[in-house]
Image (cartoon, rainbow, N blue to C red):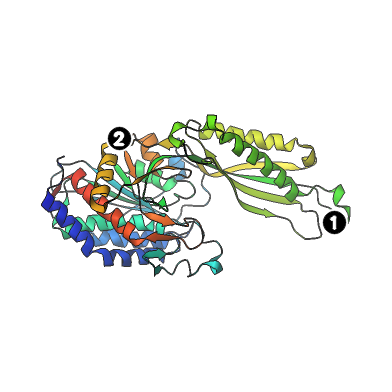
Amino acid sequence: MPQLDPGVRRAILDAVAALEGEAVAALERLVRCPSTLGNEASALEEMARNYGALGLEPVRIPTVPEKLAEHPGFSPPLISYEGRDNVAAVFTPREKRGRSLVLQGHVDVVPEGAADIWQTPPYEPSIRDGRMYGRGAGDMKAGDISNVMAFRALRTAGLQPAAEVQFQSVIEEECTGNGALACMLALPKCDAVIIPEPGPGVEGLYTAEVGVIWAWVTVTGRPAHVRDMQAGVNAIEAAYVISQRFKEYEAEMNRAENIHSSFFGVNHPVNVNFGTVQGGEWNSSVPTRAKIGLRVGIMVGNTAKRVKADIERIVAEAGADERMRGAKLQLEFAGFMADPCVFDKEAPIVRMVQRHFAEANGRELRDYPASGLTDGRFFTLYQDTPVACFGPDADSIHGIDESVSLESFHATTRTIALTMAEWCGVEKA
């Protein structure tokens, strides 16, 4: 497709600017939805309303484990999918002349943590110094709204894409990715994908991402009164022994010879996190049971299958430790079973995004090899569809006082709107 006509480009940019107030209001409405795992319904409904306001018919796409289980990208689910169907919408032009596009984003957010130490309540969006604060404001509800407002800007400019555009709002990006997998398989393959995931304090273009496995280890010790504690096996202390072995593994995986070239210069890209712990019954009793939940990163060049075997080996070796004598270990896998991937920086959609971002905003996107992961892996690994994964400057993602730069949010919208117009071509609305 030829580059955008200067008049069309100007009209689109003017439309994005005219819609900035509505974009901020739409982001506020979405941030007010407390869409943690299992509670995504309000955010999904909000996105359905957004699609309807574009004149598109929202479609519910269920996540059915039985239909996905044999796919290599499937991850073991944590909870039931009932009442949590993904929402999609498909725009069809009068005449298909351009290249088709997916605009995808996730609506789920991680728990807010200690809400009492947020400066303002996590689900009451607050704007301070040009940033919107709230859980999910950056990760990635700003991107969700950018997808919508980019299309709205074309319509405001009297235009619409001259190719199919799929909108996908998905669940469980933060724990399995099964929502994205379900949508990808349910809808026709497109020519390219844009996912406006945020950068950590920068406007980042994702160039690679690690894989991730979630696992739980339950330790059953031998209870005893604290006066006879040497006669028991302390399950909490035994869990600590296991955690030490995983930290040794983490250090090994971060040795220079184990780091893929796509991550050169990134400090400590493979992380093992102990995210949850449950255990004990009474302060004066040697605890019977402790359960730790962990997240294990996977470097490019490795696979989830091999790291799963590493986890099984580490737990088995820990069970043979003298300090664990008498303890019983149970290992379970649920949640992420995700392979790493490298995104094609030379793909036309990626080069186009980079160019439009620089020209419209006067600065460059920064390459970002991510020590986390996105739904972009599904399209890259299993569909061979090029992905431009980029997004606004967000701070304290998964932390306290998460925020997104509103100027950066609008910059993302400008970039998506211009890229959609050039990639798909345009016709009169």
| SS label for mark 2 | loop
Can residue 118 be seen from the camera position used here? yes
- Figure quadrant of residue 10: bottom left
User: Which numbered tag is attached to residue 346?
Assistant: 2
Q: Which residue is mark 1?
A: 226
Nearest the viewer among 58 and 100 is 100
In the rendered image, residue 344, in percent from the top left (x then y), is placed at 34, 35
> How many neighbours does mark 1 have within 10 angstroms: few (below 14), some (14-19), or many (20 or more)?
some
Nearest the viewer among 206 and 325 is 206
What residue lies at 67% left-to-right and 44% top-to-bottom?
Answer: 243
Q: Are marks 1 and 2 in contact (CB under 8 Å)?
A: no
What residue lies at 63% left-to-right and 35% top-to-bottom?
Answer: 312
User: Can you name the residue that lies furthest to the right here?
Assistant: 227
Is 165 placed above or below 13 here? above
Is 132 placed above or below 318 here? below
| SS label for mark 1 | helix
Instruction: Give the amino acid type for the residue marked by disc 2 in the picture.
Output: Glu
Can residue 71 be seen from the camera position used here? no
Instruction: Give the amino acid type for the residue marked by disc 1 in the picture.
Output: Val
